[in-house]
Amino acid sequence: MKKFGLDIWGDNNFIIQDDTININHASKPSLLEITTEIREKGYKGPLLLRFPHLIEKQISTLFKTFNKTKKDFHYKGDFHAVFPLKVNQFPNFVHALMDVSQNYNYGLEAGSKAELIIAVTQTPLGAPITVNGFKDKEMISLCFIAAKMGHNITITIEGLGELETIIQVNQEFNDGIETPISPKIGVRIRLHSSGIGIWAKSGGYSSKFGLTSTELLEAYEMLKKNALLDSLWMIHFHIGSQMGDIAPLKKALREAGNIYADLKNRGATALGAINIGGGLAVEYSQHPHNQERNYSLKEFANDVIYLMQEISKRKGVEEPDIFTESGRYIAASHSVLVAPVLELFSQEYHEKGLRLKEVNPPLIQELYDLFNSLKRENAREYLHDALDHMESLLTLFDLGYIDLEDRSNTEILVNLIIKKAISLLKDEDTDELNKLQDRIQEKYLVNFSAFQSLPDFWGLAQHFPIMPLDKLHTKPTNPASIWDITCDSDGEIGFNRDLPLYLHDIDVSQEEYFLAFFLTGAYQEVLGMKHNLFTHPTEAVIAFDEDGKYQIEDLIEAQNLMDVLDDLDYDTNIMDKTLKYRIEESELLGKEEKRDLLGKLYLYLSENSYLKTIQAIDEEH
């Protein structure tokens, strides 16, 4: 895997420089330099690094691409975008998002009451807010309150029951008002067109949200009857997240465009926008044969603008404003998870681990001789002999003829022979050697929780780009499986020969080795679960000043043990008193030992759940 596929997924956001992975911006600092500085402040465990300049880059690229396409096609509608808060509601992200997007009139999309409060308080007046998902009277009323504040807010109707509630709330808020103010209204349509892949069910007649054609006509009549037709201004559809193929979008655009034109010609004169939802895909792949999307942003914009223009001309209606709700595209690249490797689990297979006796069983002595006399010309033959000997020796162990030391020597010697043979035969790419290489893969124990920080890997088998922070001028040779620190066998990113990851052979007792997980900014944080009570990692915003130097800002440490338990509604005061009482009242302890234990206890309770290396503990205590 050439340079860990950086040229495939990196989008020129990172570069390899002086043996490290660096941020390709301003002074181009290395991720290792930033990580080291944060750890020197006392923050251990995994780190989540946020880069606001990458949020701005994505927003700028999105707007520039669509505005250029509009100019090229002489398109008369405007382009707008909102960020769907479900993708990432964390304050450090949202604050950075709204700060860097001020020049684009960029807004937010909310799908719950709590998200609506975020949108209303964080979005500047005039920037668009869209409200999707199922809504009750209280949520709809909050939308009316936002409109009366001066917000440019659109309620998307997901069902006829919601429209009935909107009509009722409009009467309550605006009856007797000389100049009534209400939100704009959008209608989500249930398309015949569906997406593909994991999120295909977001579209099609069986999709969860949206109105059928029959319901749409009924909604039109209800709006007209209740003098709200002038508020209908948006058609909305969504065919799925991470849309890897452009073809389903084209089909959906034709369907939605014709619905828009039909409603316009029917008398919905205020209708002026089509919201194409999200779905703009991110390239997560590190391997050229397994890329996840077959189109560029330019092709995406060209198709949207061209098809809306072509339908509008043919049906004789104004070209609509275009809205997108692409959250993954905006957020994914902005954060990087950095976690230290704690241990390599196969390091016991070294020659120094052998426990050879003065007289060894004949087959073990033969294995030892095979290892010492292994050369390229005999590598394949000796390899086959070693594998055969291993089967025989394991059978002898099961029958009780050899002991545990003999079995250990067998495992170590066969592993060493496989490694040496593969190295000698590295120019031969055979299925046999590839399978043997899989067999000796290295297990890297990494200080993070996949369930907390990479839930889409666990739940959807979504792969994320992974690479070490340094040693990038040295070829990695270990086929790598990554184990997290949870006590769950699903917390493993196993080695995959079709999508291989190779890492360096290092001694973590002598040096630190960090892995970076990229493109984690979309969904991973908000979907992360506290499996084993591992909490959100320590996070920091990495900003750049006018001189191009990086600044570590808004550093939020991972929750300590008692805060995590408090979140689960344990009475931590009682827990604290119980722990203290059981030490103070213990008849097994002396006064000085009690004082010492209490000091250590409260120190440990102030830490988070992530592990510390032995070296780190020794340094502090």
Image (cartoon, rainbow, N blue to C red):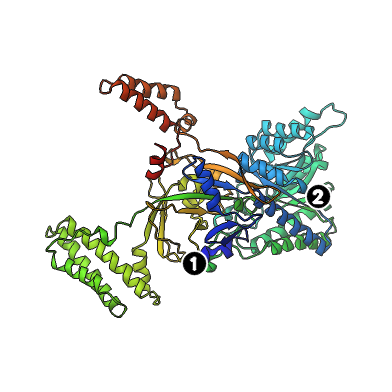
| Residue 322 to residue 102: above or below | below
Q: Position of residue 178 (x, y in %)?
A: 88, 29
Q: Would you name the residue on which mark 2 appears? A: 272
Viewer-proximal residue among 376 and 28: 28
Q: Would you name the residue on which mark 1 appears? A: 1
Give the mark nearer the N terminus: 2 vs 1: 1
Occupied quadrant, residue 312: bottom right
Question: Does residue 494 appear in this view?
Answer: no
Q: Position of residue 34 (x, y in %)?
A: 55, 49
Viewer-proximal residue among 539 and 265: 539
Viewer-proximal residue among 561 and 399: 561
Occupied quadrant, residue 506: bottom left
For residue 384, side relative to residue 442 (left or right): left
Q: Say whether marks 2 and 1 touch (CB < 8 Å).
A: no
Farthest bottom residue? Answer: 377
- Identity of the residue drawn at 42% across and 54% down: 482
Q: Position of residue 325 (x, y in %)?
A: 68, 50
Q: Amino acid at mark 2?
A: Gly
Quarter of the rendering occupied by the C terminus: top left
Viewer-proximal residue among 509 and 215: 509
